[in-house]
Every structure is written in C-alpha cells, then in structure tokens.
C-alpha cells in the first residue's frame, strides 16, 4: 500500500493536517490559559472604548476621548498618506536617477552610480533616524529659518501657509475634473484620427491647456475663492498655517530616497534589457531619437520594469511601519503601539495590524497583475 | 590645380597608409569631448554636476577628515570644529561587542574569523578538500553557539550582554542559516503535488511576505510568550531570532522556488526514470543544481536581511543601530548624533556593498551569455 503514490500522498496529507491541528490546538490552549492567568480581556470590545491618549498629527478629527477604533483609522490614514506620497516621490526620483545612470555623460553617470550605491546599502531605518536627527538639530522656533516670505524651517518641522477653501472653490475642482476628462476624450479622438488619416494633433499642449487652463479660468470667474492662512511666530510656537512635522518629513524622505534607488536600478536594467536591435530598427524606419525612446524603448522596458516595481511599492508601504522608530503616528506606532500598551490585547491588535498590511499587499498585487496582463506581450 | 597631399609623396591607388584620426577625437581631449561635452544639454549637466560636487565635497571632507579629531578620551579633546570621532574611538568596543566581557573579546573575534573559514567553501569554487571543509561549515553554527554563549568549559555569557555589530552579525547569520532548511522545505511544499501541503506553504509564505518585519517581530516578542505553556519562557534575543528566522525563511523559500523552477523538467524525469524516490531525486539531482543557481539570490536576500536586522533595535535589542542610538543620547556626548549615525552607516555600507559586489561577481560567472 505504501508503494502506491496516491495512497501515500493521502496518508501524508492526513498526517500533516493532524500535526497542524494539534499545533494550533496547543497554541490556542496555552494562549487561553495565559490570558486567563494574566487577566487580559479578549474580544474586540476595546475598539469602542475611549483611547485616552493624544496623537501628534491626524488627517481626520481626533481627540483623546475618542475610541481605539478611531485611533485605528487615524493611524491607517497616516500610513496611507506617507506610503502614497512616498511611492510617487520614489517613482519620480527613481526614473530620474535611472535615466541619469544610463547617460553617456561620464560625470553624471558616475555621480548617479555613487548616489544609488551609497544610499541603497544603508538600512532605511538608519536613514529615517538620520533625517530626523538633522531636523532636530535645526534652530528653535524663535530663530526659525525663513524660506521665502511665509514659510519657516525649525526643529518643529516645516511651517507653510495653509490653503483655506472658501465657498465657490468647488468650481475649481469641477473644472479640473472636466479638464482631465476632456483631455482623455480628446486623446482618444486624436489617436483615432491619426490612425485613420495620419494627421497628428498637438495633444500634449492642448491637454496642458485644458488641465491647467480650465481651473484657472474657473478661479478667475469665481473671484479666486482660495485664501491662505499664513503662519505667524507667537512665543515659542507658530500660530496658523500648516505644520509638516519632522517625523513625517524624515519618514517620507528616507523611504522615497531609499526605494528610489532600487527603482533607479530597475529602470536602468529595464531600459538596458530592450535589445539594441529595436533602437536600430526604429532609426532605420526614420523615427527620431525622442520618438524612438517614447514609442519603442519605453513601452518594452515597462514590461520588464512593472512587476518588480510593484514589489518595491509594497516594500515601501511595509517599510512605512518603521515610522514607529521616530514616533510618526502611523498604524503600527499608534494602534499597534500605544493602544496595545493600554489595552494589553496583543493578539487582536497585532492581528488587525497584520491584516491591514496583508490586505494592502494583496490588493496592490491584484491591481498590478491586472495591469501587467494588460501590457504583457501578446504572442501568437 | 595642384594637389598638396599628393605633392609630398605619391602612392598607388588604394595603397595610402591610414591617416591618424582627426585631432580631438582621441586621447584625453577626445574623451573629454565625447564623454563630458557631447551636446549642449550634456554640457550643462556636466557643469551642474561639477558645481554640485564642488559645493558638497569640500565641506564634507573638512568636516569628516581635515577639521576632525580622531583620538582622545573625552569631549574636550574635540577642538578641530569638525567631526568628533573621539566619540567613536572611545565607544568603539561597545559599538562592536555591546556589553560582552572585555577579557572574552577573543571569542567573538575567533567566531567571526571562523565564520569566513566556514563560508569560504560555500562561496567559492576550486577549493581543495571541499568535501571535508563543508563538514566544518555544517558544524560551524554549533561551534559558534558555544564560543559566543559559553558552555563546554567556556565561561558562560548572558545573551543580554551581546550587542553592537556583533549582535547584528549574529542575528543576520542565524536568520540566514535557520532559513535555509525551512526555506527548502517550504519551497518543496509549495511545488508539491499534495494540495493541502501546498496550500499551507503558500499561506505561510504569502502571509509573512505580506506583512512588515516589525509586526512579525512584535508578534514574536509580544505574542510568542502567550503561545507557550505556562512556565516556559524564551529570552528576548531568542524571541527576536525566531521572528527573524520565520521572516527570512518565507523570502528564502521564494528564492529557492525560483531555482527549482529553473531546473529543466528532463532532470526530474530522468531521476524518476532511474527509479529514485522523491527525496533522493530532490536531494541528489534537483536541489544541488538548484542551490547553485540561487546563490546570488541568497546573497541579495542576506543583504536585505542584514539591513533589516536594524529593526530589532525597535523591540529593545542593542544591535549596532540600537547601540549607536543609546550612545548618542549619552549626556556626556550630547549633540554628536551625526558622527554616531555616520559611523553606523559606514559599517553597514561596507558590509552590504561588499556583499553586493560579490553577488555581481557570481552572476557574471554564472551568466556567460553574450553581452552587448
């Protein structure tokens, strides 16, 4: 009987399942006992209890009387904010440095190489702490450095004018949306016309005119309904304006610079992987270098770049949890840190925190798989 | 109609010796023209880059070397106005060994040297007596354990006394050594024909890869004590090591799976045709080939893990970064954060960069295809 692979595989699986169930049972049993001994409550009731601690910065309204559930959303939004901004910055930085890395210009090329190697070989946590320590060494609010007229740099962070949206400013937003939609429609039309007649349409400049021009026109019509709340020095702190905390800047800078270096290497590898024959064939067809890059090299390079780019985005999102080291109130430091210390409900809180990251990871990879399939090479 | 060229010397048609290239296309001038100033845009970039270098390098050089003080005993010895490396000089032993007893420093140093001896046959080919050497490599973790922690007649050392760079290396090496066997099992499980085994492995790998290391470390440091029977407890270092090992084995499994997939199907079929059992097929035919291909992947995995060991400072272990953080907040040396972090960054850079170069060297050796 043991020589029959089918029977053997069934027996093996039964053994594995039994062992696994035994392990889980053992853990559950121990945990229940330990929780009982230590008198820790179980269940998710703590989510509606008042948190009782303050959070340094929040995108939504928050005060210490609100619940741990609210803290969860405050932390989640802060995590998403730094992750999304970090991904955008890292992509811009990565493509810029990656292209410089390929430059035939010796100085530029070497400089980009040194930059990438120096920064990607130093742990990102160290970089976060380093940027943070730079900020803390800046002058105090009283002697804050001014940037331009109304922005200040001090050890409390960057103080910038905060835009105040007065009634009527919704028109600008609507104009922006209309501009974007009109550009997309125009682009589809222009592409179809070019395919049919061969005539080109200046789509780039007309798009810029629509997306930038329409909101400006809307603002002028409604009489510029956006005003600015300017920061003013008062005693030991600033009054008014928008504060960008040193913790946020440290985390954002470190994450986007660190991930940007990896993206730069991906971009370089992706562009180099496009066969030189493609470029030569494109020149032979009479395309100019700019068009060759845009129409021949980049689309093929993107196919190679996109899959690893996804995992870089996920890495950045996961690394944003290191914000806990400098006290930026992200998910791990508020909900997974302070809430955990106050309630002691480690299993529920770490479970929820992990589930959030897992969901973000799975959603991102699902989206990227879809995108990847869309741009993949269609073969016979 | 006089031709000046032909007036000097006459050559039969087609016999004229090659003329030298036009001046300005070869030599230093040619290189400068071609690589630095080929087009207006490129020239602007070159000049901008040179200005940037001029603005950045002299101040850093002044701070780090020319105006810096290197040797001394206290903060008062820093008189140059630049970096105060005296801080590192005084704290060096602590940054390297933590609170390990100074009279026993020879033990971690010996372990470190033996580590390279153990790694050598794994990392390079053409090693004489490779077979016997590898037995030593397999035995090395045991030797290292007794050397570092004591026992077998050596004076025992508490795990809380380990710290600094030494702890970083210990965590990194333990993570990679523990993750190899677990990673192999997970990778084989993920490619297994048995649906339940495959599902369990996929779930474990994707779960660990989907969450940040810091939450895994929190889990192992906060939740693990709850999972154990009453009265059993692990010390802080061991809990962190379990977290790191779980984390790195999921990544290791993916690297090894890549290697397993790269082995042609014919190898599997040939092994089966010879009548080898599953484990003999894997152990004798597939894994030896697969592991060889994935060495660069393992090295880059290790680089990532080595950088990630800094996270243990968040759960309160004093690795190199934790030690640096603790040192710069010492009231006798306040305001020297930049020196401390610069030193730590340099150490990490040297380690990671040299490993990355080794990985590139390996890839070049394995990748013998055509190059443009």
Image (cartoon, rainbow, N blue to C red):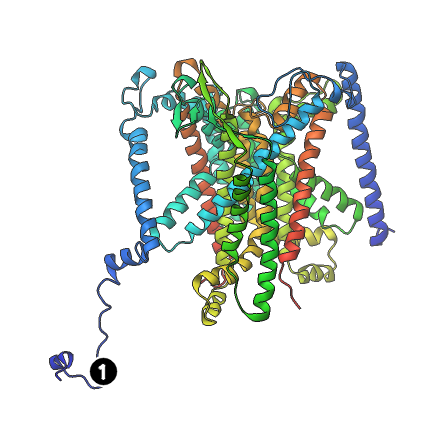
Q: Quadrant of the N terminus of chain B?
A: bottom left
| B89 left or right of A61 in image | left
Question: Image quarter for residue A43?
Answer: top right
Report if residue A102 is visible in the image: yes
Q: Position of residue A275 (x, y in %)?
A: 50, 63
Q: On the image, numbered disc 1 is attached to which residue?
A: B15
Task: Depth check: give the residue in front, A358 or B155.
Answer: A358
Q: Position of residue A299 (x, y in %)?
A: 55, 59
Q: Dot 1, how many residues are within 10 Å of its Cα: few (below 14), some (14-19), or many (20+)? A: few
| A24 left or right of A222 in image | right
In the rendered view, tell whether residue B13 sits above or below residue B334. Answer: below
Residue drawn 11% across and 79% down?
B8
Q: Position of residue A343 (x, y in %)?
A: 71, 17
Mark 1 falls on what kind of element?
Answer: loop
Q: Quadrant of the C terminus of chain B?
A: bottom left
The chain holding disc 1 is B
């Amino acid at each position: 009987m043991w020589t029959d692979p089918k029977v053997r595989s069934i027996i093996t699986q039964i053994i594995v399942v039994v062992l696994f169930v035994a392990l889980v049972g053992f853990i559950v049993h121990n945990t229940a006992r330990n929780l009982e001994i230590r008198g820790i409550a179980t269940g998710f009731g703590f989510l509606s209890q008042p948190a009782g601690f303050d959070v340094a910065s929040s995108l939504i309204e928050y005060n210490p009387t609100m619940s741990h559930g609210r803290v969860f959303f405050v932390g989640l939004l802060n995590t998403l904010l730094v992750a999304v901004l970090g991904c955008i910055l890292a992509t811009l930085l990565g493509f810029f440095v990656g292209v410089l890395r390929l430059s035939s210009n010796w100085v530029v090329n070497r400089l980009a190489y040194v930059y990438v190697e120096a920064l990607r070989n130093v742990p990102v946590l160290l970089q976060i702490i380093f940027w943070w320590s730079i900020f803390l060494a800046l002058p105090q609010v009283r002697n804050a450095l001014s940037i331009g007229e109304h922005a200040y740099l001090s050890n409390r962070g960057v103080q910038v004018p905060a835009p105040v949206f007065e009634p009527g400013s919704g028109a600008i937003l609507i104009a922006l949306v209309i501009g974007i939609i009109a550009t997309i429609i125009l682009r589809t039309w222009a592409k179809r016309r070019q395919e049919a007649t061969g005539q080109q349409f200046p789509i780039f400049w007309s798009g810029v005119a629509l997306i930038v021009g329409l909101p400006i026109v809307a603002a002028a019509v409604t009489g510029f309904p956006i005003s600015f709340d300017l920061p003013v020095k008062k005693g030991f702190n600033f009054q008014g304006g928008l504060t960008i905390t040193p913790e946020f800047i440290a985390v954002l800078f470190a994450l986007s610079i660190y991930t940007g270096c990896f993206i730069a290497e991906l971009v370089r590898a992706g562009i180099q992987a496009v066969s030189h024959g493609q470029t030569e064939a494109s020149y032979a067809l009479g395309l100019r270098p700019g068009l060759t890059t845009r129409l021949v090299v980049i689309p093929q390079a993107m196919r190679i770049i996109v899959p690893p780019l996804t995992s870089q985005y996920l890495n950045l999102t996961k690394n944003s949890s290191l914000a806990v080291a400098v006290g930026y109130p992200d998910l791990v430091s508020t909900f997974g840190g302070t809430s955990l210390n106050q309630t002691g409900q480690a299993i529920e809180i770490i479970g929820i925190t992990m589930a959030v990251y897992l969901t973000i990871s799975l959603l991102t990879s699902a989206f990227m798989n879809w995108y990847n399939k869309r741009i993949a090479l269609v073969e016979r | 109609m006089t031709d000046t060229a032909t007036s000097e010397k006459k050559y039969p048609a087609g016999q004229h010796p090659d003329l030298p290239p036009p001046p300005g296309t070869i030599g230093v001038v040619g290189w400068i023209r071609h690589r630095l100033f080929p087009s207006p845009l490129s020239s602007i970039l070159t000049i901008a880059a040179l200005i940037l270098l001029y603005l950045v390098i002299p101040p850093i050089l002044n701070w780090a070397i020319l105006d810096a003080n290197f040797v001394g005993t206290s903060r008062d010895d820093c008189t140059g106005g630049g970096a105060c490396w005296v801080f590192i000089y005084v704290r060096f032993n602590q940054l390297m060994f933590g609170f390990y007893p100074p009279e026993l420093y020879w033990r971690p140093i010996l372990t470190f040297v033996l580590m390279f001896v153990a790694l050598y046959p794994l990392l390079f080919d053409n090693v004489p007596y490779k077979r016997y050497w590898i037995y030593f490599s397999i035995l090395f973790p045991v030797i290292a354990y007794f050397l570092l922690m004591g026992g077998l007649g050596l004076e025992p050392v508490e795990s809380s006394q380990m710290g600094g760079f030494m702890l970083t290396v210990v965590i990194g090496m333990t993570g990679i050594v523990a993750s190899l066997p677990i990673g192999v099992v997970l990778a084989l499980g993920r490619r297994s024909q048995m649906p339940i085994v495959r599902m369990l492995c996929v779930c474990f790998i994707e779960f660990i890869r989907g969450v940040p290391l810091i939450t895994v470390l929190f889990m192992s440091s906060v939740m693990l004590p709850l999972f154990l029977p009453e009265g059993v407890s692990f010390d802080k270092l061991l809990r962190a090591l379990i977290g790191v090992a779980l984390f790195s084995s999921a990544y290791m499994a993916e690297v090894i799976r890549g290697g397993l997939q790269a082995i042609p199907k014919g190898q599997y079929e040939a092994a089966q045709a010879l009548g080898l059992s599953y484990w003999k097929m894997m152990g004798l035919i597939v894994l030896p080939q697969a592991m060889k291909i994935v060495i660069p992947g393992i090295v880059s995995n290790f680089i990532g893990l080595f950088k990630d060991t800094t996270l243990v400072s968040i759960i309160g272990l004093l690795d190199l970064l934790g030690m640096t953080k603790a040192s710069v907040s010492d009231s006798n040396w306040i305001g020297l954060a930049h020196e401390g972090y610069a030193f730590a960054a340099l150490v990490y850079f040297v380690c990671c960069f040299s490993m990355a170069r080794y990985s590139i060297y390996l890839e070049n050796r394995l990748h013998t295809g055509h190059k443009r």
